[in-house]
């Protein structure tokens, strides 16, 4: 049956063009599902720090669109060995454990290079920059499963999006992939569900390989290592085709987050105007600690002092101290926020869903935050493709199908992604020898860490695609009985 000219085309709005939003866009494009990405920034912007993507992320890339995976492989840098190696950085500077990554697995690259390679896969016309979402209006009934089909003329209109520049847009479905400080999340559920300081911060730097080799030697610069010890850990891996070493130093911090430790001005990363319209009736009271004005202003990055890292690693072996010596005097300092304390109750409501960090921001300690955003993108692309096919010839009953699809996505993704937030906190405690009995030489370390990584890496993504479609179809069938 051919599409009637009166049928408005199905359209997806994606808020945010980070890893999650961008890969969802490419996945929808590959399936012929119409979409527009609305991004607050003036271009696709990622800084040059490194990121490694785990084996499950690679499978998700291939299933979204093989071109995503091919571009990723072009951009990343091979590890010297297909093993993740852990070093006792405090007492011996020797390896305590290694874990097989799979052939050419868990490779890293500079974020700017990987995002740049993926950005080339999306039609620029589909991405609108300088569009900061400030409000949403969804007039459809807030039902997780379809209501009995209404008369065609009773269909609510599309979801309306309002941007900070005063413009508006409309879409059948909205996916908020707008990061840890998600506006979409706060519009859907209120500000009570938000990220909090995990009491860890990190320094990030990308340093010339020659400097790295001089400081820690050829072998330690050539592949992925982590150094563990009391209250801190460091990760290094090669990027930029081996020309640079990515350095990430993570430090436990008992204090509240203070972005300004150098006396320099600190950039706030979100100055969104307050929204005036939401589809929620009332928002829950804010649980934000009143002391934390830096958090209220979303000032989670700033300049730090290398001397703080030197203090944290004081008394450690020379290997770990060599890594700290690679940091600039005032390195970039990042607070690690996650959603453990105030998890959002659902990743969907009506025709709006959350994905990536917007839904489940976690610490980076298992190297899987972006990977889980890519998995979300795969689940959404799969189920939205089904909705598109089901409703391309008629817009009648389209809204309940969308709600059913997003509810299926939520039910499938919620537990696994919430688990990651907790598992990341547990992992950093292991790396930081928080329980001294589980520190240096703890025989259970290998098993404890393998279990968590394998839960991430071995997640069956083809089964996930089948399940999201099954849940969606079951909701539709159940509703029509
Ligand atoms: C130190 C560190 C190391 C990490 N290392 C790894 C790793 O090795 N592997 C891994 O898998 N993960 C890693 N992560 C996690 C990973 O970086 C994140 O999970 C991932 O980048 C989240 O992507 P996202 O697209 O969901 O959100 P973001 O990357 O935050 O993108 C959100 C986008 O939305 C835009 N936006 C925000 N608000 C609005 C609005 N109101 N309107 C329109 N647009 C908006 C933003 O400008 C941005 O472009 C690490 C994290 C940290 C902090």
Image: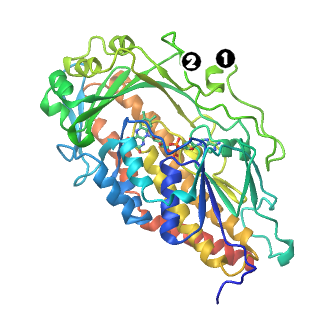
Of the 4 image quadrants, the one containing the C terminus is bottom right
Residue 423 in percent (x, y) is at 45, 40
- The extreme bottom residue here reads 1
The residue labelled by disc 2 is 256
Mark 2 CB in 8 Å range of ligand 1? no
Residue shown at 59% from the left, 26% from the top:
268
Residue 258 in percent (x, y) is at 55, 17
414, 1: nearer the viewer = 1
Q: Is residue 33 left or right of residue 106?
A: right
Element under label 1?
loop
Q: Could you tell me if the residues under marks 1 and 2 are in contact, i.e. CB atoms within 8 Å?
A: yes
Residue 447 in percent (x, y) is at 30, 42
Q: Is residue 403 above or below residue 52?
A: below
The residue labelled by disc 1 is 291
Q: Quadrant of residue 250?
A: top left
Residue shown at 41% from the left, 29% from the top:
429
């Amino acid at each position: 049956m051919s599409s009637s000219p009166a049928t408005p085309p199905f359209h997806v709005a994606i808020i945010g063009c980070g890893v999650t939003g961008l890969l969802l866009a490419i996945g929808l494009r590959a399936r012929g599902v119409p979409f527009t990405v609305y991004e607050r920034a003036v271009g696709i912007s990622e800084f040059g720090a490194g990121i490694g993507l785990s084996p499950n992320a690679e499978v998700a890339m291939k299933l979204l669109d093989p071109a995503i995976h091919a571009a990723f492989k072009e951009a990343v840098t091979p590890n010297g060995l297909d093993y993740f190696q852990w070093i006792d950085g405090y007492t011996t500077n020797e390896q305590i454990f290694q874990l097989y990554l799979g052939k050419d697995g868990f490779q890293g690259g500079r974020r700017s290079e990987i995002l740049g390679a993926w950005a080339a896969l999306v039609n620029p016309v589909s991405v609108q920059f300088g569009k900061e979402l400030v409000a949403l209006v969804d007039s459809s009934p807030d039902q997780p499963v379809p209501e009995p089909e209404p008369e065609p003329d009773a269909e609510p209109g599309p979801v309306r999006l309002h941007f900070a520049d005063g413009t508006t847009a409309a879409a059948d479905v909205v996916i908020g992939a707008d990061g840890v400080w998600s506006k979409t999340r706060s519009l859907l559920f209120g500000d009570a569900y938000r990220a909090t300081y995990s009491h860890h911060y990190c320094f990030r730097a990308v340093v010339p390989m020659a400097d790295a080799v001089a400081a820690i030697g050829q072998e330690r610069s050539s592949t992925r290592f982590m150094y563990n010890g009391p209250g801190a850990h460091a990760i290094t891996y090669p990027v930029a085709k081996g020309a640079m070493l990515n350095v990430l130093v993570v430090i436990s911090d008992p204090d509240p987050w203070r972005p300004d430790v150098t006396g320099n001005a600190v950039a706030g990363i979100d100055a969104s105007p307050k929204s005036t319209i939401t589809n929620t009736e009332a928002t829950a009271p804010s649980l934000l600690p009143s002391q934390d004005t830096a958090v209220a202003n979303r000032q989670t990055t700033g300049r730090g002092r290398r001397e703080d890292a030197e203090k944290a690693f004081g008394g450690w072996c020379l290997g770990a101290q060599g890594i700290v010596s690679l940091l600039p005097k005032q390195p970039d300092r990042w607070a690690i926020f996650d959603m453990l304390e105030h998890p959002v109750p659902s990743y969907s409501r009506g025709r709006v869903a959350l994905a990536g960090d917007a839904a489940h921001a976690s610490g980076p300690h298992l190297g899987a935050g972006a990977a889980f955003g890519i998995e979300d993108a795969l689940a959404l692309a799969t189920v939205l493709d089904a909705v598109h096919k089901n409703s391309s010839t008629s817009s009648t009953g389209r809204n309940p199908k969308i709600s059913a699809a997003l509810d299926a996505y939520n039910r499938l993704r919620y537990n696994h992604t919430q688990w990651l937030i907790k598992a990341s906190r547990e992992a950093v405690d292991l790396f930081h020898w928080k329980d001294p009995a589980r520190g240096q030489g703890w025989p259970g370390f290998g098993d404890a860490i393998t279990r968590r990584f394998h839960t991430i890496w071995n997640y069956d993504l083809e089964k996930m695609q089948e399940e999201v479609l099954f849940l969606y179809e079951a909701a539709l069938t159940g509703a029509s009985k």
